[in-house]
Image (spheres, helix red, strand yellow):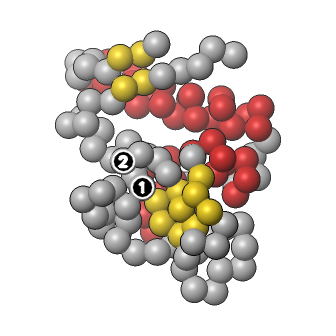
Amino acid sequence: MRKCKIDFNESLHPEPWRDFYIRYFPELETMDVKEDGFTDQSLRCLHHDDRKPSATVNVKSGFYVCHVCGSFSPYRFLVEIAGIAPENASYFINDYLRELYVKDEQTGNHLNKVE
């Protein structure tokens, strides 16, 4: 499988990973984000019985950090936390990124680079 590398124009996609994680954490839709890209409130980790929220998401870089489980890239999050098969996780991420890219093409904001 060919790897998909997409560089986003930050003004078009200031938080490109927010929608990616909303399907797992609906509360992200209304959460504020600090300047470094991390959510200002903790989330309950999907991987363990989290009585007190211990995770946060960086909606700019895509990193998921649980203070119990550790740090995860979007791919590792899908495989190790969400339980998606490794062979499907890459396709899932590429489809998500391509969807953002196609939206730019449709609106004429085609400033991103795809390799």
From the image, tell me which residue sits under label 2. Answer: 60
Q: Is residue 94 above or below residue 73?
A: above
At x 72% / y 73%, what residue is drawn? 48
Displayed quadrant of residue 7 = top left
Estimate the spatial distance between the alpha carbons at disc 1 and disc 2, rounded to whole Å.
5 Å
Left or right? Give the position of 86 relative to 45.
Answer: right
Q: Position of residue 30 (x, y in %)?
A: 35, 67
Q: Which mark is residue 97?
A: none
Left or right? Give the position of 55 relative to 28.
Answer: right
Q: Are marks 1 and 2 in contact (CB under 8 Å)?
A: yes
What's the amino acid at mark 1? Asn
Q: Residues within 10 Å of mark 1 (few under 14, many from 20)?
A: many
Displayed quadrant of residue 104 = top left
At x 42% / y 55%, what residue is drawn? 58
Q: Is residue 17 above or below residue 37?
A: above
Q: In the structure shown, which secondary structural element does the residue marked by tag 1 occupy?
A: loop
At x 43% / y 63%, what residue is drawn? 28
At x 46% / y 74%, what residue is drawn? 42
Q: In the structure shown, which secondary structural element does the residue marked by tag 2 occupy?
A: loop
Q: Position of residue 34 (x, y in %)?
A: 28, 64
Q: Is residue 66 above or below residue 100?
A: below
- Quadrant, the N terminus: top right
What's the amino acid at mark 2? Lys
Q: Farthest bottom residue? A: 51
Q: Position of residue 19 (x, y in %)?
A: 44, 49
Can residue 61 be seen here? The reply is yes
Q: Position of residue 113 (x, y in %)?
A: 35, 17
Q: Is residue 7 above or below residue 11?
A: above
Q: Which mark is residue 58?
A: 1
